[in-house]
Every structure is written in C-alpha cells, then in structure tokens.
Amino acid sequence: MNYDIKNIKLAEEGRFRMQWAAREMPVLDLLEKRMAESRPLDGLRVSACLHVTSETGNLMRVLQAGGADVVLTASNPLSTQDDVAAALVAYNEMSVYAIKGEDNDTYYEHLYAALDHKPHMTMDDGCDLLATLHSKRPELLDTVIGGTEETTTGVIRLKAMAKDGALKYPVIAVNDAMTKHLFDNRYGTGQSTLDGIIRATNILLAGKSFVVGGYGWCSRGIAMRAKGLGANVIVTEIDPLKALEAVMDGFRVMPMMEAAAIGDIFCTATGDIHVFDQRHFEVMKDGAIMANSGHFNVEINIPALEGMSKEWRRVRHQLDEYVLNDGRRLYLAGEGRLVNLAAAEGHPASVMDMSFANQALSAIYMREHAAELPNDVFAVPQELDQEIARLKLHAMGVEIDQLTDEQEAYLSSWTEGT
Ligand code: ADE
C-alpha cells in the first residue's frame, strides 16, 4: 500500500466522523451488506477521484466490501478531510493520495499515483482522472472497461469528449440520475454552500442582497436556502426558461452587470468561466463577499481581481481580503474553490447516501454490461434510480400508495375521455 496524506495520527477522528456520517447513509449500508455477500466487484481495480470526505470514505468501504481493490485520490486541492484520508489508510488499508491545500503539481502527482494502480474502472468527480488517463497515460486504456462520473461539470466534459470521438470507454453519468441531482445538487449544495459562506464569514444573511449566478439545480438550492435565511435574493441567468422559473419562484432576475452594483454577497454555481469578472468587480460595493460553488475555480476571475488589487491578506480561516487600487475591499471565500467543501464539510450524508448508492450500483452495472456498451456517456438505468428512491423512502419510514387495478387500466386506455 502506498499513500500520501497529511497525518496518519488523525485516523481515529476520521473513523468517528465516517461512523457519524454512516448513520445518515442507510441505503449505502444496505448495499454494503448485499455486496459483502455477493462480491460483485471481486478483483476489480477501481481508481476513484472524489472529494475525500467522510461520506466518500463510506462509499470506498462499500466498494471494498464488494470485492473491489480501490485507491482514492482527491478531486479538488481544497476539499480533502485529512482525518478521513488517514482513517482509510489506517483502518481500511487503502491507498489514498490527498492532502487538504495541496498545490496543483501535487494534485496531479496524486492523479498519476492513482493511475499507477492500472484501473479497470475510473470513478470521477469533475473528469480530471479520466481526462488525465486519456491524455497522459493512454497506454492504460486497454485494461479499462468503463467509468462513472459524479458531477454536472464532469458530464459536460465527457459529452464533449464523446462528441469529438475522444472518449475511449463507456461512462455512466451518475449526476443525471434523479436520485442524484434532484437531492444532492439542490438540497445538498443549497445547505452546504450556505454553511460554507457562514463558516467563512459568520455574517448575518437576513436583510442582505444575495446574488446567485445561474439557476440550475445547484443554484436553485442556494437561492432557496439564502431566501430561507432572510436574504433578498437576486438571480442571474442566460437561459430564458430558467430565468422565468426563477421569477415565478419569487426571485428578482437581472443581468449580472446590474446585480454587481447591488449585491452584498455573491455566489456562483454555473459551471462556466468568469461569471464574476473584472467589469463586475469595478462596480461592486466596498465589502462585497464572493464565493463559488461550481466545480472548478474559474467562475470568479481571480487573476483579474489580483490585477486590480494593491494588496491582499487572509482575514479569516477561509476568507481573503483584496484591497483594490481605488481603496474598496472585496472578499473571496475558499480561494474561489468549491466553498461548501473548502470552508465547510460538503453535502450532508443523507443526500450523499443516494448519490453514492448510484455510484456503487453503477459500478456493478458497468462491470456486468461494459462489453455491450459503446464508448459514450450513459444514464443510470431507470430501475436503479427508482430502486434507490424506494430504499431511501423505506429507510425514512415513509410509505407511498400503489395504483389500483382500476387506475392502472385507466392510464393504459385511450378510449376514456370527456
Ligand atoms: N460533493 C459535495 N459534497 C460532498 C461530500 N460530502 N462528499 C463527497 N463529495 C461531495
């Protein structure tokens, strides 16, 4: 076993936090029991590039229980929980390559170390591992049967690769499962992003103008939770349908250039570049706070912010103050990286339960079906999605109705009308 982590002495704390998270992960727990018996991943080498959190730690344990030989590397330089990395090494004998705050070179060295495992399967969050394998280690492609992808940004990259004919093995888009994005992206990102902004700043949100970039599933969650805390929420969009939805959900919608001059707090989660750009910094109020909850740290144009600043300093644990040449001060949370993971602990376990049940079941599905699948991006099969929703409801003690025979017959008939 090889590893590169911060401190093995943190292992016990990490194990406690993984156990605490497991209490809210009943679906994954059930899968662990099933997989420990049937061993559907026996002998499968999996290289996973995920945020190294207590929830991910539990997924890794489940894959191991199912017979997989797993290594784990971080999917973001700032998202690692060092105690979890230590626990996986110490108690699960897993190779882990992840240190919170690692620089870009170390981040990529860790990806290469995970690829040295010669994976049969890759498991990505953001597509960095798959992209690195394709571009820098193509000789490994022969042994890879398939992969999975956790997040919107990664799925977009994969679809671009597939369109270019560059994707050399099939990948399941876990993100697109209903039991993933409807809950993880919306409620998970909503709660954990606000958690991150509050931990980074400790400001009161009530009465503040809170600008949300985008109105996809993640931004919807952020807008909803910011509103719940009493902020006046402004949404910016480029898609007329999403903008209309935001308006009817009760938010003010306007171009970013207008919102920039009004906002006290700004948070973007669009997946695109420079959502907050120099022209916006030029009109922002003194004291405005910015955060990003999109996958990559490109949504805020940090080089432009640095270029406009005469000095910067770290004023709190995850908050930097930029003093602009004209004297205004702008604040950046979590270095512009995923604020929910950089400044807080990521999505709560209860939603990761469903996201990672999708990962585990998709890994099994891929093992069984990879040979039939062309090199493209696939949805999680609907039966799996439905099964996860059923198991989650069951674990929550919620029962639902079934169609009566009469109702079923009515739905399948075309003769009954007015
Ligand atoms: N992405 C967002 N929150 C996460 C978490 N808690 N664990 C793993 N990946 C995440």
Image (cartoon, rainbow, N blue to C red):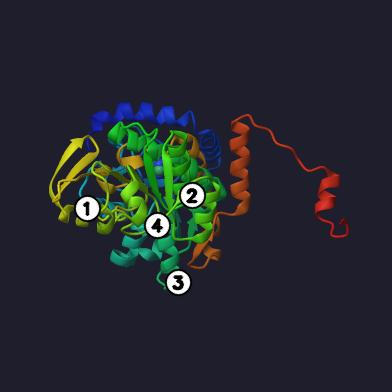
Residue displayed at 36% across by 29% down: 15
What is the C-alpha distance between the residues marked 2 and 4? 19 Å
Q: Secondary structure at mark 2?
A: helix
Asked whether, in this view, residue 20 is left or right of residue 407, the answer is left
Point out residue 234 in the picture as x, y percentages from the top left corner. Answer: 42, 47
Spatial CA distance of label 4 from label 3 is 32 Å
- Dot 1 or dot 4: first in sequence order is 1
Give the image quarter of residue 380.
bottom right
| Dot 3 alpha-carbon crowd within 10 angstroms: few under 14, some 14 to 19, many 20 or more | few
Q: CA distance from mark 1 to mark 2?
A: 29 Å
Name the front one of labels 4 and 3: 4
Question: Between marks 3 and 2, how big is the CA–CA gap?
Answer: 24 Å
Q: Residues within 10 Å of mark 2 (few under 14, many from 20)?
A: many
Q: In the image, is the residue at mark 4 within 8 Å of ligand 1 by its beta carbon?
A: no
Q: What residue is disc 4 on?
A: 255
Q: Could you tell me residue 408's position as x and y percent?
A: 81, 49
